[in-house]
Amino acid sequence: MVRVTENSVELRAAREEDLPVLEQCTQSPESTGPFQWFGWQDPAKWRRRFAENGLLGEDGGQLMVVSGETALGFVSWRRVVVMPHSSYWNIGIQLLPQARGRGVGTRAQELLVRYLFAHTPAVRIEADTDLENAAEQRALEKAGFTREGVLRSVVFRDGRWRDGVVYGVLRDEIDAGPVAVLPTSGRDSAPTPSPEAPRTPNLTPVPPTPPTQLP
């Protein structure tokens, strides 16, 4: 087994060879774990979406969580529209069983937050999880999120409605730092920006710079 540490974790855009990992993460109760198993899904959805946009779109996407050349799972984000000109990101994560319990989830979600704040003008990022999922709640808190409340009977799983916990983090609550996202040949690993989003340079890690105010 490849040795995985929190400091070795990076994000990169998905490649075609990652599709079996994405399928494994979502098509097996043994791989998803008890809090992410919602029954069998369309097994071809990942390949269709990858062919369409490389899993990177204007309203959401996925990046692979990796350590070196080893894929450990993926992080995702989707746009939540509140009003016509107001929206924020909701993020999630799914790791393979062998990557859990090592700080990988904390680091991956911290990197995703920095990535989205660096490359989109959002000021709020939200995450939610099952009320019984103590491990993910700890990971979110370590990644800088604040617990904001309980959503009663919000998710149907394993025969009954479950309570969820919602977490949030704001742009000015995150210190500026390098964005550890790896480039990948053939596809840009940044989400498709909205028209008002600033143009950004390449995604290779850079030394920390003073905070900048993004719209």
Image (tube, rainbow, N blue to C red):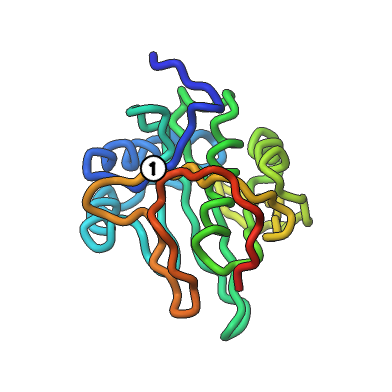
Which kind of residue does numbered mark 1 sit on?
Leu
Q: Residue 16, percent across and down?
A: 22, 44
Left or right, 151 with respect to 158, comes to right
Residue depicted at x 35% and y 50%: 41
The answer to which of 9 and 18 lies nearer the viewer is 9
Left or right, 112 with respect to 12, comes to right
Q: Secondary structure at mark 1?
A: strand
State the count of labels.
1
What residue would you read off at disc 1?
A: 182
Residue depicted at x 57% and y 63%: 89
Q: Residue 30, percent across and down?
A: 43, 29
Q: Residue 53, percent across and down?
A: 28, 62
Residue depicted at x 41% and y 59%: 201
The answer to which of 189 and 61 lies nearer the viewer is 189
The answer to which of 175 and 64 lies nearer the viewer is 175
Q: Is residue 125 above or below residue 83?
A: above
